[in-house]
Amino acid sequence: PVSLSVFLLALAYSLIALAELSAFYLNLPWNTATRVLRRVFYLSMCVMSFISLCLLFLVSSWIVFGVLIAPSKLLPYAIALFSLVVAALSCWAKRARLKVRAERDVLKAVDVARKRLKVSPPDMLLNVMVEMQLQEAL
C-alpha cells in the first residue's frame, strides 16, 4: 500500500510536470487554464520537495542514530553522509567566491571602459545600469 501510494504520487507529479513543460515549450497562450496549470505545478513541486527533504532528514537521522547502536555496520554510511555535506558546502563556497570575483572583474572592466569613453553618461545612471545587468547576468 505504501509503495503504491508513493508510485501514484510520483506519477501524478510527473504528469503535472509534463503538462507544464509541454505548455511552456508549445508557447500556449497565457489564459486561465495555463495559469491554473502553473499554480498546480508549483504546488505539486513544493509538496514533492517537502516530502523529499523529510525523507532525506529521516534517513540521515537514522544513519546517525544507527552509528550509536551498531557503529561497525553504519559508520561507513555516516562518514559518507558527512563527506557529502562537506563536499556540498565546499562547492557552495567555491561558487560564492567565483561570483564575488566575477562581480569585481566586471566592475573593473566597466571602469576601464568608462575611462576610455569620450562622452561619459552620468555616474549614477551608469552605476544603476551596470548593477541591473550584473545581477541579471549572475
Image (spheres, grey):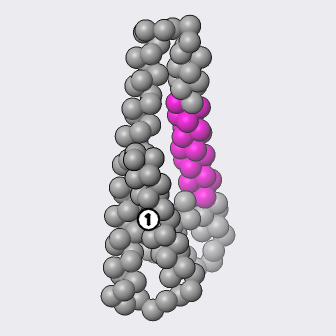
Q: Nearer the viewer, residue 67 or 114?
A: 67
Q: Position of residue 20 (x, y in %)?
A: 48, 75
Depth check, front residue: 54 or 8 = 8
Q: Nearer the viewer, residue 100 or 4?
A: 4
- Is 53 situated above or below 105? above
Quadrant where the C terminus is found in the figure: bottom right
Picture layout, residue 62 above or below residue 52: above
Label 1 environment density (alpha carbons within 10 Å; few <14, some 14–19, many ≥20)? few
- Residue 47, given in percent of the width and then of the height, sits at 35, 55
**Towards the viewer: 35 or 102:** 35
**How many discs mark residues in the rendered view?**
1
Instruction: Point out the stretch of residues depicted in magenta.
Output: 85-107
Q: Is residue 41 above or below residue 89?
A: below
User: Residue drawn at (61%, 58%), measured in percent from left and top?
Assistant: 106
Q: Is residue 120 visible?
A: yes
Against 22, is 132 above or below? above
Q: Going 40% across and 17% down the picture, which residue do you hit?
A: 65
- Label 1 sits on residue: 12
**Magenta stretch encompasses residue 103:** yes
- Where residue 80 appears, as percent x and y from the top left, is 59, 24
Three-letter residue code for mark 1: Ala
Occupied quadrant, residue 125: bottom left
Q: Residue at x 34, y 64 (%)?
A: 43
Residue 29 in percent (x, y) is at 45, 92
Secondary structure state at the residue bearing disc 1: helix
**Residue 70 falls within the magenta-colored stretch:** no
Q: Residue at x 40, y 53 (%)?
A: 5
Which quarter of the figure has residue 113?
A: bottom right
